Amino acid sequence: MNFIGTLALLIGLAAPGAALAHGDEPHGDAPHPVGTAPRLPGFEAATESFELVGRVDEGALLIWVQRFETNAPVLAATLQVEAGNRKLPAVFDAARGLYAVKDAALVQALQARPGPHALVLSLQAGDEADLIPASLTLPAEEAEGDHDHEHGSGTALRWRALIAGVALLVSVAAWWWFHRAFRTELKELDA
């Protein structure tokens, strides 16, 4: 393998920050919904037709619904959330492009018990209907201040990983250069 190929391989291996920096944004070239997709904690669920992302925030269960193939937002559909023995309607918020289940008792019950919560979402969009299972996961420390701190600490971790990767790359490149120079010198002495 030549020096350029080795260098390209090492750069790819030494850039874990680039992979970690990927957020929870929608994919594809289609326009994204007015509301941006949330970061964890929450849930993601998909069928052949739809993709749903949700999180507990603002005292409600917020849900973004998109077409699976195009990432186009699904607007003004009928969405119902089943949690335990309760079935609750999700109201479409056109200004933000999302659906919200505004039920204080549900939100309190979810936040009171960290960990996974089984949900079943019933979606009716035009002639299409889907029954979508999901698992909403809430960590033990879901305070607003903690979330901002964790995000900052994740950024610091990505920077440290990137710096370590670059240092590794420089070390390996230096080793390779010295090794090659040493081999060339040995060949000249043998000749």
Image (cartoon, grey):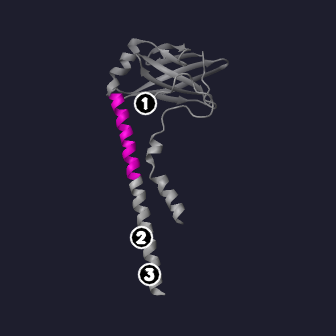
Task: Inspect the image, locate mark 3, and give the three-letter code of the amino acid beneath it.
Answer: Leu
Q: Quadrant of residue 118?
A: top left
Find out whether residue 122 is within the magenta segment. no
Is residue 162 part of the magenta span, yes or no? yes
Q: CA distance from mark 2 to mark 3?
A: 12 Å
Residue 53 pos. (x, y %) = 51, 26
Above or below, 52 against 8 in this view is above
Between the C-alphas of marks 1 and 2, the distance is 46 Å
Left/right of residue 163 with respect to residue 52 in the rendered view = left
Type of residue at label 2?
Answer: Phe
* Viewer-closest of 170 and 68: 170
Rendering coords of residue 68 (x, y %): 61, 30
- 186 shown above or below 11: below
Q: Secondary structure at mark 3?
A: helix
The image quadrant of residue 114 is top left
Nearer-N-terminus badge (1/3) = 1
The answer to whether the residues at label 1 and label 3 have Cβ atoms under 8 Å apart is no
* Label 2 crowd (10 A; few <14 / some 14-19 / many >=20): few
The mark found on residue 178 in the picture is 2
Outermost residue to the right = 127
SS for callout 1: loop
Q: Give the distance between the C-alpha atoms of the residues marked 1 and 3, in whole angstroms.
A: 57 Å
Q: Main secondary structure of the magenta part?
A: helix
Q: Of the two numbered discs 2 and 3 on the same chain, state the one appearing first in sequence.
A: 2
Check residue 40 in the rendering and tell me which mark sits there, or answer none. Answer: 1
Q: Where does label 3 land, which residue?
A: 186
Q: Is residue 34 left or right of residue 70?
A: left
Give coordinates of residue 31: x percent, y percent.
61, 27
Q: Which residues are magenta?
A: 146-165
